[in-house]
Amino acid sequence: MTDLGRGHRQPYRVLGEGLIDRHRALSFRFDGKTLTGFAGDTLASALLASGIHVVGRSFKYHRPRGIVTAGSDEPNALVELRTGARREPNTRATVIELFEGLDASSQNRWPSLQFDVGAINSLLSPLFVAGFYYKTFMWPASFWEKFYEPLIRRAAGLGRASLEADPDHYEKETAFCDVLVVGGGPAGLAAALNSARSGARVILCDEDFQFGGRLNAEHLHIGGLTAAQWARRVESELAQMSEVTLLPRTTLFGAYDGNTFGAVERVADHLLTPALHQPRQRLWRIIAKRTILAAGSIERPIVFGGNDLPGVMLASAARTYLNRFCVALGRRVAVFTTTDEGWKTAVDLHSAGVAVEVVVDSRAEIKPALLSAAQRLGLRVMAGAQVIEARGARRVHGIMVRDNRGRLIRFQVDSVAMAGGWNPNMALSTHLGARPRWSERISAYVPAETLSNMAVVGAANGSLALGEALREGFLAGRTAVETLGFSAAAEETVSAEEDSVEAAPLWYAHRCRRKAFVDFQHDVTRADIEIAAREGFRSLELLKRYTTLGMGTDQGKTSNSNGAALVSALTEREIPALGTTMFRPPYTPIAMGTLAGHHRGRDFKPTRLTPAYHWAHEQGAAFVESGQWLRARWFAQPGSKIGWQPSLARSKQSDQAWEFAMSQRWERSSYRDPMLPYS
Amino acid sequence: MRILCPFCGERASSEFAYLGDASAARADPQGTEAMARFLEAVYFRENPAGVHTELWYHESGCRSWLRVKRDTCSHQIFDVAYAKEALRT
């Protein structure tokens, strides 16, 4: 592969259009090393382009970890962003928009990312099983507070918060609208377009800096345009409408009663420092008459041995990096899929010039169309086979595949794209207590059928095909405005591909020997869940707390469903019979500063002034805070420099005697709050 | 939570002050067993998980007293009226 990073040493950058600007190179630092990316990159895509695949160490075993996803569901690639007072821990590299001068460092490693002393935990892993804290640190009881807890606290945790005061400021805003559209993918754009054309007040928000969702990441066509072009066209039409508010870089984090929603807009997070008077982030309170949830879906990883090695990535993320950012995840790739969509990754990678060594599909029967397409490209296909383990130290070096006749075959690859099916991203629909229901069709939970004032459309509703998502979006947009009394505009029909999305879930690869991770962020392996189930933790809620499955900062976005499936198999119950763990706000972590807004330091409470304040101020009073009130504490006499003692002493004519008297008095009353007025 | 004030329109609950159960009636101090009835009205109140009728004061708005029927679990509001009107009926 030639260097397509325009001489900036980006060995994994490939040819293609994408949504990056190759004429604007941005330099940034990762662990002190200066690297280059392009405008339009995320930190993750720029790191991958530069060939940096190990970006962090895991929580418990300190195993090297790479980038798994291309969105806010990322469990692994947590980095510390910026330095000094602006240092921010646990930010996901996959959602950080690259800017000139960005400075990030890896976390949870000592002394360095490549060599980490804590990795010895991996050898001690028999000690660190599920419920490790509960079992190991039991006795003697008196050791807990003095010894165990400080020890655990030092060893655990991910990033370090800055101990300096935050120099930036944060704003709050309240907005009202007729229709709130959450998510700017195909369904969301269609819904926003149809409701906005009726003249209704519409707010469209998306957590990405670019509207379009999967339209930016796939080779799809809508009405004669490429999907990305269609997204740009809809976005520009929406931007011209006066009643529409477009909020990119905005995460809707919670649904609250009274049709109220909370959102965080990252106003200046993509800049080195905010401009003068520009807030860093803005907390939105949005009151919407109707809400259309089009938050898309999250791809499931597959649980197989060594599935946490850098180089193993979700197939959809591999497509996103390739098509949107023009970055290949490796040089020799294996695709491990349980869905038709995984095949798209194989085809896309192959046409970008990446060697696809093998396509492993766990399903015994595969559509002839897919097979013939693969045959045309000369791809090696293994049906009814499973990748049972990935091997390597700091990067995948090879995989072991068990074929449909039980033979083990080894492949030399440096990365694996895994496609385990999709989980609709319907967290917001459950915040107010609605229980999701199990869909046999896509083997995942989908939103409840009846939700007040909310419609769920597209992949968030389990409608994974593009044409279906667009139709649902248009329809939901029209229905929402019609119930509010607007007359909907003429129907737009767009022709779009019905991409095939069939899937048969494979929750875990069978008979693999190496550690197979279910929760990457909290290092919960398949063995941990087996132990917990054996010890009687049959309830998902208990098992979750015992093993810490899904309790990381990602809240199990990629791990909960695989964990539930494992428990279901171990306890021989159907997945829906286990019950669901409910989602609570916030959807992604929120900085405390954003919630506080301007209410911090002196502005935490109003400062109240007595009627005599101005008079006292003129007399040179020194004030004391008494609750919210400012009270005159003493009046400095002319000529005295500072403090109340000289002022009073002067009037007594005897400095020494007075100081002695006062010191005695202070001593006797030293238990008093010195901030209270002296009486 | 948002309350539909009959005078101001729909407002955020942060504009209102809460005063509890609207069904607790003050006892007649001259009546029989006045003490027991006061005790009943002041201390022995229902705290239902479900539909509850309660008094809200629109402190940062029109300053009217409202009688609000609300589900204490889901925060759904069924009915809002001026407290004095509710008294008359």
Image (spheres, coloured by chain):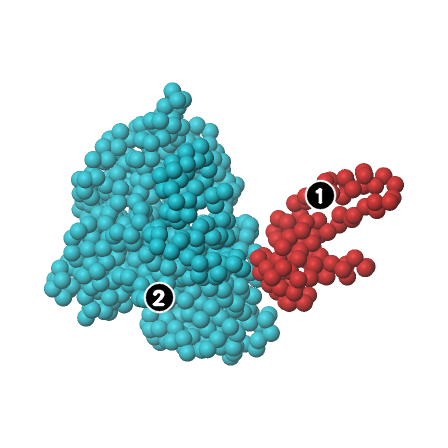
Q: Which residue is disc 1 drawn over?
A: B46
> Dot 1 surroundings within 10 Å: few (below 14), some, or many (20 or more)?
few
Label 2: element kind: loop
Q: Which residue is disc 2 drawn over?
A: A277
Q: How many marks?
A: 2
Quarter of the view holding residue A671: top left
Q: In this view, does A509 lie to the left or right of A426?
A: left
Q: In which quarter of the image is the N terminus of chain A?
A: bottom left
| Residue A134 in view in this figure | yes
Colour red belongs to chain: B
Q: What residue type is labelled 1?
A: Glu
Q: Tell me which residue sits at (36%, 30%) in the image.
A: A149
Q: Which residue is farthest top? A: A140
Report how far apart the C-alphas of labels 2 and 1 lie in the structure. Answer: 51 Å
Q: Tell me which residue sits at (15%, 58%) in the image.
A: A11
Residue A14: x %, y % from top left: 19, 63
Closer to us: A28 or A281: A281
Q: Tell me which residue sits at (45%, 40%) in the image.
A: A673
Q: Is residue A180 left or right of residue A394?
A: right
| Residue A410 in view in this figure | no
Residue A560: x %, y % from top left: 42, 44
